[in-house]
Image (cartoon, rainbow, N blue to C red):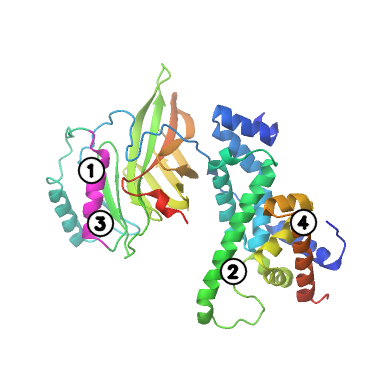
Amino acid sequence: MHKGNTTDDVLQAWSHRIDGELESPSASLSFARAWEPSGRGSLSGGLPPPISVSIWRIFSAGAVCGAATVAVLMLVLLVLGGAPHSGDAEEANGPPELAELTGVYGELSRLFPDRSVWVDGTDEKLDIGMSEKVDAYTGMRMVVRVEVQRKSEEGRWSRVWKRDVLTAEDVRVQSGSSEQNEGQLDVWIQPLAAGQWILECHLDLPPPYGIRFRRKTALEADAGGEVMRRMALGDDLRLVQKLVPLPGEDADERKG
Amino acid sequence: MMDLEDDHSLLERIQHDDNPECFGILYERHKARVFRIIAKIVLDEAAAEDLTQDTFMKASLHLGRFEKRSSFQTWLCRIAVNNANAHLRKEITRRRHTHSLRSEGGNGHNGLTPRHSLFWKEENSRVTAAMETLEPHLRTSLVLTVIEGMDVAEAARIQRCTRSTMYWRVHQARKQLKRVLGYA
C-alpha cells in the first residue's frame, strides 16, 4: 500500500502513540477440547456417588437472605420429601444428582420467580442460592461440573472432589465457603455463540488438594476436559470442567 | 520447544495429539496483534480485550474449519475483524435507540466509544474522532493496510472482498479522513 501522504503519516503517528500505551490482554485463557461426551443431561460416565441432603445453606450475591426466606426454603425441603437430615450421611437411592438439582432448582424458581436462583452440590451436600435483587434470568439453564481427579498407581483417574452447579447463563454464582475450609467456587457462564459458552471459573480448594484456579474456558454443550494439572503431596491431580445444558434447553434455538 | 514451532506444526499437534497447550502458545504468539487490530477498529481498549478473548475462543472451537489455504494469522484476523465489526454494528444500533435520550455533546465525540479510553486522550482524540466517522468496513480497511502494513491481497482475504474492492475502500477511507482532518 502506498505510504507517505499526510493522512497516512498522521494515522501512523496516532497508532504508535496508542500502541505505546496499550497493554496486551493479560487474561489467562484455557482451550479445552471435547472430552468424554456422555449425552445430553448426563453428567457421569459411570454410576456417581449419591448425594445426601445433609446441610442447607443460603447464599446470595452479596448478603444472606432474611429469616422469612429461610422459612420458605425449609418448605422447599418438605416439598422435596423431608426435613434436612442430620450429619449422618443417608444412603440415597440411585444416582440422584441431576434429578435432585433440577428438583430443588424448579422449586426455588417457582417460589422466587423474579430472582436468579442456583443450586450446587458436592458429594455430601447441596447448597442453594439466589440473587439479592430482582433480576429474573432469561438465559438457558445448565449444569457445570468441576471436579478434581487423582491418578492412581495403575494410571487410572478417579474423582476425589466434585461440585455441580445448576444455574443459568449470565448469573454469577458464588458457592462454598473458604471460611469453613471446604473450598470456594465461583462460576459464571456467558453465551459465546450457538451451542458454545465461556465458563469463567474461580476455584479455591484448600489442602490436601491446594488448588487455586482462575480462568475463562470456551466450552461446547456436553463437553469439557482437563484445565489444570498439578502435583500435591505426591498425588498427581487434575482439574476437570464440564458443561451440560439441561434437557429441554435447546442451544440451536439460540442461533441468529 | 513447542514455543519455537511454527503455527502449522502447532495446529497439527492440536489435531493429532489433542493438546490444548499448543493453542495456548498460539494465543500468546498472536494475542498482541489481534488485540491491536481490534482496538483500532472499535476504538476502545476495554471492549477490545473482551473481543480478543472471544476471538481466540471462537478460533479454538472452530479449528476444524481452518482449511490452511491461508495462514493461521490471516484466519485469526478474519475472526477478529468479524468480531470487531459485529461489536460496532451492535454499538451503532444501541446508540440509535438511545440517541434521543442523549444530551448534545460539544467535542465532536459521538459517544460510540467511552471517553475514558486512551483513544480519547487529548493528543489522540482528533484522529480518533476522525476514525469514528468512517463506516466499519472503511475503518477496518485502513487499520489493516495503512496501520498494520498488510498488503492489499491479505487485507482483502481477511475482509473477504476482491483486491479492487479493497483498493477502493482504502481510497475512500483516506479521502474521508483527509476531509475530516482538514487536509483536503
- In the displayed structure, A160 sits above or below A106; it is above
Q: Where is residue A145 in the image (x, y as percent from the top left)?
A: 37, 40
> In the image, is A51 to the left or to the right of B125?
left
Mark closest to the chain's N terminus, 3 or 1:
1
Q: Give the extent of the magenta segment.
A: A95-113
| Labelled disc at residue A100 | 1
Residue B145 is labelled as 4
Mark 4 and mark 1, same subunit?
Answer: no
Judged from the image, the secondary structure of the residue bearing numbered disc 3 is: helix
The span from disc 2 to disc 3 (Cα, nearest Å) is 37 Å
Separation of disc 3 and disc 1 at Cα?
14 Å
The dominant secondary structure in magenta is helix
Task: Please name the amino acid that badge 2 sits on.
Answer: Pro
Which residue is under mark 2? Answer: B114
State the image coordinates of residue B31 (x, y, percent, origin top left): 64, 47
Horizontal placement of B90 versus A50: left or right?
Answer: right
* Subunit of label 4: B
Q: What element carries label 4?
A: helix
